[in-house]
Image (cartoon, rainbow, N blue to C red):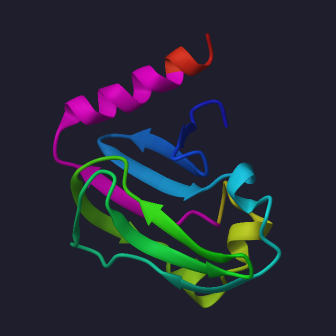
Amino acid sequence: MDDLVTYMAYEWLLVEDGVVTIGINEDGLEELSEIGKINLPSVDDEVNTEEICGEIETDSGPLNLYSPVDGQIVEINEAVIEDPNLIIEDPYGDGWLFKVEAKDAKELDEILSASTNDSD
């Protein structure tokens, strides 16, 4: 999990080959005991940094999902839509949410440099 970056305090990010995988980290799951429904963006949707692109309905209220980069959705995790509890059971594995291909590689560099600074 050393390669993961925290975003918006409750999302984790993994950057690989220009694509960012997004999931919910332990801090985000702390308050949750039940996940009702998940609304994820669709493949090929354009997403923008800091704009809501999805939502998880929980027993504590809605949890908004954000993309850390401007880009295009290249994959969503159908398994979590069918079984939302995967997010709680395996947040860093099978419980990932969606993948975004960044429009601008500089945004990826900023994410990676932020993670390097966090560990100093």
7 relative to 111 in the view: left or right: right
Residue at point 31% right, 79% down?
A: 42
- As displayed, is residue 27 above or below residue 114? below
Please state the horizontal and vertical placement of residue 38, each as a whole percent of the image: 54, 82
Q: Residue at the far front: name it.
A: 61
- As displayed, is residue 113 above or below residue 19? above
Is residue 28 found inside the magenta-colored segment of the image? no
66 relative to 36 in the view: left or right: left
115 relative to 75 in the view: left or right: right
Name the foreground residue: 11 vs 4.
11
Q: Residue at the far top: name it.
A: 120
80 relative to 99 in the view: left or right: right
Name the foreground residue: 19 vs 120.
120
The range drawn in magenta is: 95-115
Please state the horizontal and vertical placement of residue 86, each as a whole percent of the image: 71, 74
Work out which quarter of the rendered image holds the N terminus and state it.
Answer: top right
Please state the horizontal and vertical placement of residue 110, each as a whole percent of the image: 33, 27
Within the image, what quadrant is residue 37 found in?
Answer: bottom right
- So how many labels did they put on this image? 0
Please state the horizontal and vertical placement of residue 85, each as a whole percent of the image: 73, 79
- As displayed, is residue 76 above or below residue 83? above
Residue at point 74% right, 52% down?
A: 26
Residue at point 74% right, 61% down?
A: 29
Is residue 107 found inside the magenta-colored segment of the image? yes
Within the image, what quadrant is residue 30 found in?
Answer: bottom right
Work out which quarter of the rendered image holds the C terminus and state it.
Answer: top right
Residue at point 21% right, 34% down?
A: 105
